[in-house]
Amino acid sequence: MQPTTSTELFFDLVFIFTITQLSHYLIAHPHWRGAARTALLLALVWFVWVYTTWLTNWLQPDQGPVRAVLLGVALGSLALSAAIPEAFAGTGLFFAVVYVGVQVGRTLFALWAVRGSPWLVAGFQQSLPWITGTSVLVVLGGLAGGVAREALWAAVVVLEVVGLLIGYPLPGRGRSRPERWMVEGGHLAERCAAFVLIALGESILVTGSTLTSHVDLETSGAFLLAFAGSVALWWVYFARSAGAATEVIAGAGERTGALSRVAFNYLHPVIVAGVIVASAGDEVLLREPGTPATTVAALFTLGGPALFLAGHAAYKTVLWRALPTSRIAAVVVLLTLIPVCVGLGATVVTCAALATAVTVAVIIADRLRVRRAPQSRGPRSPLR
């Protein structure tokens, strides 16, 4: 498997700021429209990150021209992140222009960089008209405002998802088939896992920075609970399934391209969205742990882990073709607890404790399932 390079890791660092901006945007706009706008911004930024990651799957990131492009995309992504707070107001056009420059510029570079590899050239030739078309819509959205901007950017997200799903068909050229993509799935899995780790790290950063503004016994207890919640989400994703998923995708043969498309382009942003919502819940927890939970606070503290587990359940289902019942049950329990906690006047800290307890239950269920599984590689280590 191609190892992740320092250039790629440096590129990823920019997105710590992105996750912070998205989390703060959601906290500043705690309503359904704000949540929808946060989802739109996350999707657009995710396209920038994941398409760049696919490019480095085929090229050598430490080569001079590729490294220069990665740094350029990192700079553009930093500018995008800076524009997030007012993306649906004064900085919308700036956000759109930077987005178009990054997406179209990177694709044009790819066409030059992969010359000599006909199947790669054909793939980028298929995607360029689609990316150019959606870029026009992004700019039109930047020029428009209000509902029109939301509708145009939502159309971009839909077209990007559908275009990749059907292989960017063009008249007279057919479509790009995933079995021809020759993807190194293990590398993509490792890169997406790194992004999830970045998102979780940002969540800890938010809780730490919030704690420093007001340190007392109550806030310190809330901080420990928020940290425990982040650890639980990390454990669910990384303890076993991350490494196993890398092996599954790396050994999928002709299915690797199709699996990678669904697992990384479509499902991982759902997992990241769960971390963003949970991070918003952590900030609410640290600011007002003992107050009765509002609907928004309950949605953040309980809905964030539910969204994370739902995305991870879909991810595991796609890879192993089996329903992860513990995660599905946990999602149902967490969603049920939202109206119950609000109706009973439960405090924010109670909601957060319940969310962590449900996530820990998933970890225990995973542990028990592994212990019941037949051992095929000799005696069990006491640490396994």
Image (cartoon, rainbow, N blue to C red):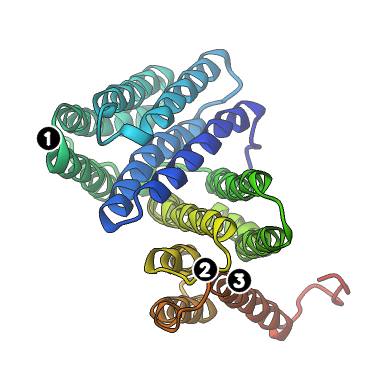
- Which mark, by number, is residue 291? 2
Q: Which residue is mark 1?
A: 172
Amino acid bearing label 3: Thr
Q: Secondary structure at mark 2?
A: loop
Q: CA distance from mark 1 to mark 2?
A: 62 Å
Q: Position of residue 236 (x, y in %)?
A: 61, 66
The earlier-in-sequence mark between 3 and 2 is 2
Instruction: Residue 310: give x, y in percent of width and height.
Output: 44, 68
In the image, residue 28 sits, relative to residue 345, either above or below, namely: above
Residue at 50% of width from left, 78% of height from top? 346
> Is 269 or 119 nearer to us in this picture?
269
Q: Disc 1 residue type?
A: Gly
N-term-proximal mark, 1 vs 3: 1
Quadrant (top left/top right/bottom left/bottom right) for the C terminus? bottom right
Q: Earlier in the sequence, mark 1 or mark 2?
A: 1
Q: In which quadrant of the rendered view does residue 332 lie?
A: bottom left
Q: CA distance from mark 3 to mark 2?
A: 18 Å
Q: Is residue 215 above or below residue 364?
A: above
Q: At which x and y percent is residue 317? A: 46, 70
Q: Is there a contact, CB below 8 Å, between mark 1 and mark 2?
A: no
- Please, what secondary structure does the residue beneath circle 3 have? helix
User: Which of the labelled discs sits on residue 356, or is there none?
Assistant: 3
The residue sitting at 53% across, 69% down in the picture is: 348
Front: mark 1 or 3: 3
Alpha-carbon distance for marks 1 and 3?
54 Å
Tag 2: residue type? Thr
